[in-house]
Amino acid sequence: MNAESRNASFIRKSPETPPRPVKAVIFDFDGTLVDSEPNYYVSDRAMMLSYGIDLTEELKREFIGVGAVQMMQVLRQRFGIAAPVSELVRIKDEFYLRQAVGNTVVYPQMLRLVRTLHAAGIPMAVASGSTPMVLDTLMVETGLRPYFSAVVSASEVPRSKPFPDIFLEAARRLGVESADAAVFEDAVLGVRAGLAAGMRTCAIPGFPEDDLAPAYLDADLLFPGGMSFFSADVAMEWLGVPHP
């Protein structure tokens, strides 16, 4: 990416004039709708320390966008943890909810986008690597749940991101074809999954200070500077949905 592109507030590929309106929108949850990664790092590190393992920030970054079950499968095998995966996921959730309840913030521009889409009658879903228990708790806690027609956890589909399963299931529950849906994602694996599902994909990198992975550059709409530069108005125009 050249310096001009890197400094752009957003990059849009082959814009349609006028854009073809979407029929449904699917959001990742952690790092996309809510600022949760700091909470996850604190809780996951504390949880792993209880097993005598130091979960460094570098190691935790390996699992950004990875489902909770898949993450525990990998860590269990890598460090020889005796506890079954189901127990590890349960304990992980307990540590996380103690940290996250009352301490999870919805990104303001995302909240504006969600409210505007809801007012326009566009059905929405969440498709997340978090477990159903975490999603149920925090979507109610943050006030987001009433806006969404469906919530899908990676634990409910055969394969986690970067496979498209979770987005395809979300579209199925919303009753739309893939080509008529759009995805909002912060993680590389999620962007790859959205594109693999054949959906218009918006990428908002979770770590914009890092070199941008190629998958971000493949997105249909990219905010290179991350959430600090995300605009609900730009997103609505890209979606082809009228807005105030």
Image (cartoon, rainbow, N blue to C red):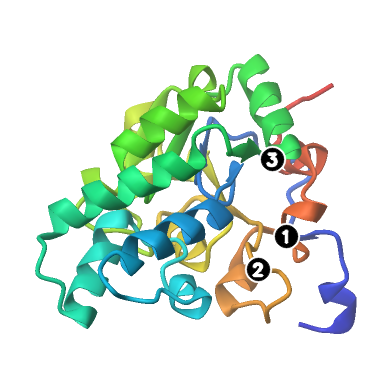
Q: Which three-letter amino acid code belongs to the residue tagged 1?
A: Gly
Residue lying at 82% horizontally and 75% vertically, measured from the top left:
6
The residue nearer to you, when weighing 11 against 37, is: 37
Q: In the rendered view, tell whether residue 42 sits above or below residue 2.
A: above
Percent of width and height locating residue 5: 84, 74
Asked if disc 1 and disc 3 are in contact, CB closer than 8 Å, the reply is no
The residue nearer to you, when weighing 32 against 73, is: 73
Residue 103 is left or right of residue 148, and the answer is: right
Residue lying at 55% horizontally and 49% vertically, measured from the top left:
36
Q: In the rendered view, tell whether residue 137 sits above or below residue 41.
A: above
Asked if disc 2 and disc 3 are in contact, CB closer than 8 Å, the reply is no
Asked if disc 1 and disc 2 are in contact, CB closer than 8 Å, the reply is yes
Alpha-carbon span between mark 2 and mark 3: 15 Å
Q: Earlier in the sequence, mark 1 or mark 3?
A: 3
How many other residues sit within 10 Å of disc 2, few (<14), some (14-19) or many (≥20)? some
Residue 175 in view: no
Q: Secondary structure at mark 1?
A: helix
Residue under label 1: 226
Residue 231 is left or right of residue 200, and the answer is: right
Residue under label 2: 207
Q: Which three-letter amino acid code belongs to the residue tagged 3?
A: Tyr
Q: In the rendered view, tell whether residue 161 sits above or below residue 53.
A: above
Percent of width and height locating residue 144: 55, 25
Residue lying at 34% horizontally and 59% vertically, measured from the top left:
47
Percent of width and height locating residue 84: 10, 60
Q: Quadrant of the N terminus?
A: bottom right
Q: Which mark is residue 107?
A: 3
